[in-house]
Image: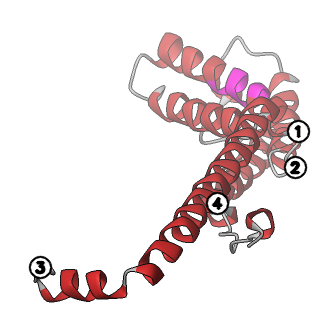
Amino acid sequence: MNLHNVSQPRISTRWQEFPLWIGVAVLSAMFVTDGILQCLGRSVLVPIGSFQEAPNWLPTLIGVIEIAAGVLLLRSRSTPYAALYLCLIMITGAYLHLRFTGGTLFVAPSLLSAAVAIIGYERSPRVISMRRFRSAIDAFAESEILREELRREAVVEPVTRVRPRLRKAVASGHSGR
C-alpha cells in the first residue's frame, strides 16, 4: 500500500473571511458617503466646517481623502494603507471633538478608528502570510496524522487475520481458554 498518494478532501476556509469583507464593505460605503458629505460641508462624523478656526479648504481635502481611502479599502493590497489614513483622520476628528465641543461626540470617530485599525491589521500582508503559513503547517500535520493512522491499520490488519478465533472470543466476552 502506497501511503504517500493518500489524499483527503480539502475544506474551504474562504467563508471565514466573509465577516471581514462585510465590515470592509460597510466601512467603505460609510466613508465614501461621509467624504461626499464632508465636501458639501454636511458631515456627520467629523464636521470640520463647524470649527471656526478651520481653513475653508480643509473640509474638501478631508472629504477627498475619505472618498479615496474608502474606495481603497475594497482593494486587498491597499487596505492597510487606506486604514492608516482613515485612522489618522478619525483620531484627529475625535481629538477635535473632545477639544472644542467637550461632549461625547468623540466616541463615534474613536470607534470607527478602532474598527478601521482592526480591518487594516487583518488585511495586512504579514497577517495574511502568517495565516497561509499556518494553514500549510496544518495541512501537513493532518496528512502526517492520516499517514500514521493508515500505517497502524496496515500493521494491525495482518495480526487480526492470523488470530480470528481470538478476535471472536474477545468480541463475545470470553477469554478463549
Residue on which disc 3 sits: 177
At which x and y percent is residue 59?
79, 29
> In terms of image quadrants, where is residue 26?
bottom right
Q: Which residues are magenta?
A: 84-90
Residue at mark 1: 78
Is disc 1 in contact with disc 2, using a CB cutoff of under 8 Å?
yes
Mark 4 Cα shell of 10 Å, populated few (<14), some (14-19), many (≥20): some
Near mark 2 (Cα within 10 A), the count class, few <14, some 14-19 or many ≥20, is: few
* Amino acid at pointer 1: Ser
* Residue topped by disc 4: 147
N-term-proximal mark, 4 vs 1: 1
Residue type, mark 3 in image: Arg
Q: Which tag is nearer the camera, tag 3 or tag 2?
A: 3
Camera-side residue of 23 and 175: 175
Question: In this orientation, which residue lies closer to the viewer: 1 or 30?
Answer: 1
C-alpha separation, residue under disc 3 versus residue under disc 2: 74 Å
When the figure is inspected, residue 5 is found, relative to residue 37, above or below; the finding is: below
Tell me if mark 1 has few (under 14), some (14-19) or many (20+) residues whose alpha carbon lies within 10 angstroms of its own. Answer: some
- Which quadrant would residue 72 be assigned to in this image? top right
- State the SS at label 3: loop
Label 4, label 1: how far apart the Cα atoms are: 41 Å
- Label 1 sits on a secondary structure element that is loop
Upstream in sequence: badge 4 or badge 2: 2
Residue bearing the label numbered 2: 75
Sequence order check, earlier mark of 4 and 3 = 4
Q: Residue at x 61, y 55 (%)?
A: 142
Q: Give how far across and how far down residue 117 sits, in percent.
A: 64, 31
- Identify the residue shown where x is 89% and y is 41%: 77
- Marks 3 and 1, how far apart in space? 75 Å
Residue 4 x, y percent position in the rendering: 78, 62
